[in-house]
Image (spheres, rainbow, N blue to C red):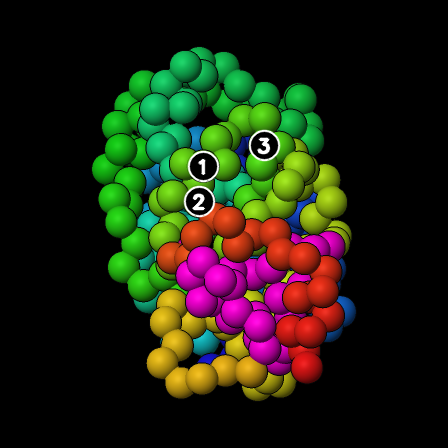
Amino acid sequence: MPTTHLLYLHGFRSSPASTKARMTAAAVTQRHPGVTWLCPALPASPRQAMDEVLQATADWPLATTAMMGSSLGGFYATWLAERWGCKAVLLNPAVHPARDLAAHLGDQTVWHDPEQHFVFEAVYVDELLAQEVAHISRPERYCAVIAKGDEVLDWREMTDHYPGATIKLLPGGDHALSDYDQHLDAVLGFFGSAGGVETERLPRKRKAPMKGPSCSRCSSYLLGTSPVVDAGFFWLNRATTSACLRLRSALVRSSCA
């Protein structure tokens, strides 16, 4: 089912003015003008942030709603996706922000506007703990772009938290995903378009034979009909072995045969 409503949740000390939020908003407006877009400025309190999001989206059709989240926003998006049962794209998502942000109590500034201040209180750590999702329920609903070069979050912890999900693991990169423009098309493709065209996702298990080469270690297949190739990396099911993350260019070329 095509996406008609898209929610974007920014990260800690970020805002709707972030580069990724603005780039995504522009792409959605230009390519899918019929899609309802929302990127709210989230308050410091996690409970208040989610209450405001739930109120703002109260009349959204959940069957055609999708969301995106960056860093702490990815944590929020996971909480919402489990509640709503909809698709979510996560960009270097925080997994245990209560642990990570406990050392950042007190006065903070917004990255994109140092004149804006807010206070991150100790009670907010408890609110984050209450929102933690121990295990995702339906991995096929999730897609994550994760950079091994993330200087803030551990890429192993991120990938381990989403077993069976569609993962795009970048060999380098950074927490901000400075090369986000190179991944935006594939990110939006995961949702399908407003025109009703869905992008095929890699299944957790495939019983029927499929064309194309398979990995000798785990027998996972490359689908020539899916936008899986990007700079030698693939959208892969995390249930497969990590040895499959980089395949030879010969396999890339033959995957569409």
Could you tell me if the residues under marks 3 and 1 are in contact, i.e. CB atoms within 8 Å? no
Q: CA distance from mark 1 to mark 2?
A: 5 Å
Residue at the location (59% across, 26% down)?
151
**Residue 129, percent across and down?**
26, 33
Q: Mark 3 or 1 closer to N-term?
A: 3
Q: Nearer the viewer, mark 3 or mark 1?
A: 1
Residue 156 is labelled as 1
Residue beneath disc 2: 159
Magenta residue span = 212-238
Residue 11 place in picture, x, y as percent: 52, 38
Q: Amino acid at mark 2?
A: Thr
| Distance (Cα) linking label 3 and label 2 | 12 Å
Which amino acid type corresponds to the residue marked 1 in the rendered image? Answer: Arg
Q: Secondary structure at mark 3?
A: loop
Does any portion of residue 24 appear in the rendered image? Answer: no
Assign the C terminus to one quadrant of the image: bottom right
Q: Earlier in the sequence, mark 3 or mark 2?
A: 3
Which residue is located at x 66 percent, y 22 percent?
115
